[in-house]
Image: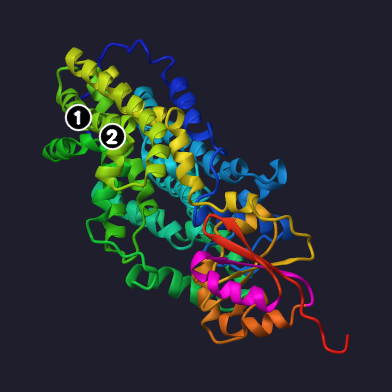
Amino acid sequence: MSIPVTTAGAPAWSLERWLPAFAFLFAAFLLFVHLGDAPLLSPDEGRNAEVAREMRESGAWLVPTYDGLTYLDKPAFYFKTVALSFALFGESEAVARLSSALFALSLLTVLFLFCRRVYDMRTASLAVLVVVATPLYWAFARIVIFDMTLAFFVCSAIFACYLAEEHEGRQRERWYRLGALAAGFATLVKGPVGFIVPSLVVAAFGKLDGREGALRRCFAWQNWLIFLAVVLPWFVGVTLQCPDFPYYGIMKESVSRFTTTEFRRTQPFYFYAVIIASCFFAWSLLLPESIVAAWRARRRWSRPDRLFIVWAVVVVAFFSVSQSKLPGYILTAVIALGVLAARVFALAWSNGAGRAAAIVRRGTVALFALAAPVAVVLATAASDALWLERVLGLKRKTAEFLQPGLLAMVVSLGVVTALTAFAWRRRNVKVAFAAFLGFPALLITLNFDLLADYADSRSGRRLAEHMPELPAGVEIACLDCLPNGLPFYLKRLITVISDEGREFTSNYVLFSLQRGGPWPERVVPLAQQDAWLAGRDHPVFLMARGDDVEQLDTIAEKYGASQIELGFGYWGALLAPPQKEGL
């Protein structure tokens, strides 16, 4: 949090000239290195990449599809950015993630420019480093998901509205127009939350800021006109093609998600306190004492400090009330906290005897106290597979598989421990900052294999690689399952035999199937599977998970086929079309 210490008159920092360049080089390293070296994760990445692939093939701009089914869980904007990347660079994991990574880098650029304007160059550079080295930011920047694109437009809208009140006349109007435009695009990314979040932050900040007329100027009809000019063509276009969309998008995807437990994402009220402690680590170690210091000095907050504090509080409070909670919902709050943490380090750099430096020193001790014992425990585990078996109850094969990754983690934690010890002994804020930065940098280098192995265990890539080569005329069908990412990796649609359609991990697909009308061609009700198979005039490769293997065996025997083990918990059988009578 911000500490009321001025940097005016502080001696020039010898590293300041190259700090911005280092900040963006470090950010690019964390965002892009190994970007495509891990398979698509379950469930979001495999599904989202396939939606984008189908948009590229069909050329659609308004209505996305997933495995051939209409997919309106989210607007098409983000999917189209990925589809355009596929069109330019080909279809791969790296290209699928490129959109998120580029929006993450663009957001860091906007953040840098804003912080340089309202603070100084040092704080702006440190803010880039803190935010990009935050696990939540780093993770969402490297996966195929909407949150980073949404964060870019939400943050841009808030920054623009803040800067509008720093000007007068037409320049103020232009900033507000830009904010309205950004809020419109945020809505195109993820629906109403795209304008609700910046509106709440700006409204709360405007109230606290005490600027008479600021809210009226922010929500002027001209700004609403720009917002609607962005959003309405999409909304009307989708509604014309899918008349049930307004009810689903507003009542189900927005109102029900916020007010009910229908979407099965309930968490306790304190959920986001845990998320901030873990996903804002190691910067979260500075928060407890910083919050106390900032509250005591609340009358001396600068205007930008007040913005980021209000921003973090409003977003966390809003989503804590929601019945649906996911870590990505508070991504912009974590960005605001990152700027405040950068303020603490910038002030500590300027005044090594001040309160901010004391907070950094105690945070460094806390980081040492966590990293050192964990390093010792992991060193024991990495050197003794039997210890992993006895203490964690792992199988010998699993324990031996984990050992190399654990050893790399020990090295990373050892480096962090050494840096924190040196920083504390020398009372060196710069080395302390390096210790806080060290773990994510080492994670993406020394520990990447461990992350890739985890992703491999939650992806359909290996299954796709072990599938038999099937001609285009063979229909692939899945019995009560849909392996994550399989349509993307096979570059073909899959028929799903299902009881209710949960295999698609799509709330809109479930909503559509439960309305009572005829099911889409590629979704076969489980009760009709025998009739469906009997009506096929071409071969069907039927897949099932291990828990349905007996049912698959019965079907395969009926069609004179043999089961083959595909591995990774799946089995398959190539069923020839039944002979028609009279032929």
Q: Residue 363 shows which numbered tag?
A: 1
- In the image, taking residue 323 as reference, residue 235 lies left or right, namely right
Residue 46 position within the rendered picture, expressed as x and y whole percent measured from the top left: 56, 54
Is 27 covered by the magenta stretch?
no
Camera sees residue 184: no
Going 33% across and 71% down the picture, which residue do you hit? 259
The quadrant the C terminus occupies is bottom right
Q: Residues within 10 Å of mark 1 (few under 14, many from 20)?
A: many
Count up the numbered dots. 2
Q: Quadrant of the N terminus?
A: top left
Q: Badge 2: how crowded within 10 Å, few (<14), some, or many (20+)?
A: many
Q: Earlier in the sequence, mark 2 or mark 1?
A: 2
Q: Residue at 39% of width from left, 60% of height from top?
A: 196
Q: Is residue 35 left or right of residue 493?
A: left
Residue under the point 30% across and 27% down:
413
Q: Is residue 257 above or below residue 282?
A: below
The residue wearing badge 2 is 282
Query: Could you tell me which secondary element the residue under label 2 belongs to?
Result: loop
Spatial CA distance of label 2 from label 1 is 9 Å
Residue in front for this viewpoint, 464 or 429: 464
**Residues at badges 2 and 1 in contact (C-beta under 8 Å)?**
yes
Choose between 443 and 511: the one closer to the eye.
443
Tell me which segment is drawn in magenta.
537-559
Indicate whether 304 appears above or below 313: above
| Residue kind at label 2, given as amino acid type | Ala
Q: Quadrant of residue 307?
A: top left
Q: What is the x, y in percent for residue 248? A: 49, 74
Taking the image as shown, residue 387 lies to the left or right of residue 172, namely left
